[in-house]
């Protein structure tokens, strides 16, 4: 009996390792887009992915034919949505402090100009290719609202970023 349990645990671990080897890169990229961190400096995205993968591993035996990638992506999106506002406000505060100190204002990833909800919907729709109906169900919004948020987010990204104005404009000498 003990040998059979050990063999099942080894098989489970090997299956999960194979899944992670194939999916972790794409999932980490999605997490990095969600957190709006630079690709090479993404500790929040790594923690987010680790938590989602841990959840998937803990429920690996309960998948029963369900796609583990889809399950992990849902968990990733859910965990991001649950903690996004805390990080969003921290990032905004850091951005304001950097501007006040005269430091570089831009340090984040390509989606940093978007709010957390816009990033989540845009990543699910465009990067992950999730249908509007599924995205709406995942984020708990009507399909029309998801469509509107996605369109607005794309329009925001198409516009050039607004340049930060200097803190004290120089006064022309007489």
Image (spheres, helix red, strand yellow):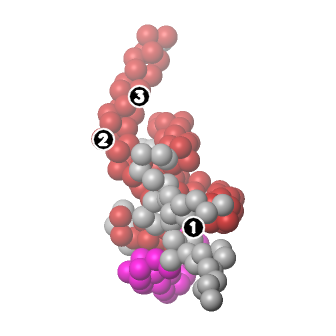
In the image, residue 67 sits, relative to residue 119, either above or below, namely: above
Mark 3, residue position: 12
Mark 2, residue position: 22
Left or right of 142 in this view: 154: left
Magenta-highlighted residues: 139-162
Label 1 crowd (10 A; few <14 / some 14-19 / many >=20)? many
Q: Secondary structure at mark 2?
A: helix
**Quadrant (top left, top right, bottom left, bottom right) of the C terminus:** bottom right
Find residue 45 and report its horizontal and vertical position in percent.
51, 48
Q: Secondary structure at mark 1?
A: helix
The reply to whether discs 2 and 3 touch (Cβ–Cβ < 8 Å) is no
Residue 82: image quadrant is bottom right
Q: Looking at the image, is mark 1 or mark 3 earlier in the sequence? A: 3
What's the CA distance linking mark 2 and mark 1? Answer: 27 Å
Mark 2, mark 1: which one is toward the viewer?
Answer: 1
Mark 1, residue position: 116
Q: Looking at the image, is mark 2 or mark 3 earlier in the sequence? A: 3
Q: 21 or 136: which is nearer to us?
A: 21
Residue 160 is one of the magenta-drawn residues: yes
The circle on residue 124 is none
Find residue 106 and report its horizontal and vertical position in percent.
51, 63
Left or right of 92 in this view: 21: left
Left or right of 23 in this view: 144: right
């Amino acid at each position: 009996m003990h040998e059979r349990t050990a063999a099942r645990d080894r098989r489970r671990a090997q299956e999960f390792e194979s899944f992670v080897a194939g999916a972790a890169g794409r999932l980490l990229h999605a997490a990095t887009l969600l957190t709006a961190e630079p690709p090479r400096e993404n500790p929040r995205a790594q923690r987010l992915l680790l938590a989602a993968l841990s959840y998937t591993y803990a429920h690996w035996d309960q998948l029963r034919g369900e796609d583990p990638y889809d399950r992990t992506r849902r968990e990733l999106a859910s965990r991001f949505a649950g903690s996004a506002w805390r990080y969003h406000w921290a990032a905004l505060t850091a951005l304001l402090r950097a501007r006040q100190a005269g430091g570089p204002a831009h340090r984040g990833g390509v989606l940093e100009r978007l709010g957390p909800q816009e990033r989540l919907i845009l990543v699910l729709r465009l990067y992950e290719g999730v249908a509007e109906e599924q995205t709406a169900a995942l984020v708990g919004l009507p399909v029309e609202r998801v469509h509107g948020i996605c369109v607005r987010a794309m329009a925001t990204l198409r516009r050039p970023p607004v340049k930060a104005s200097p803190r004290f404009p120089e006064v022309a000498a007489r």
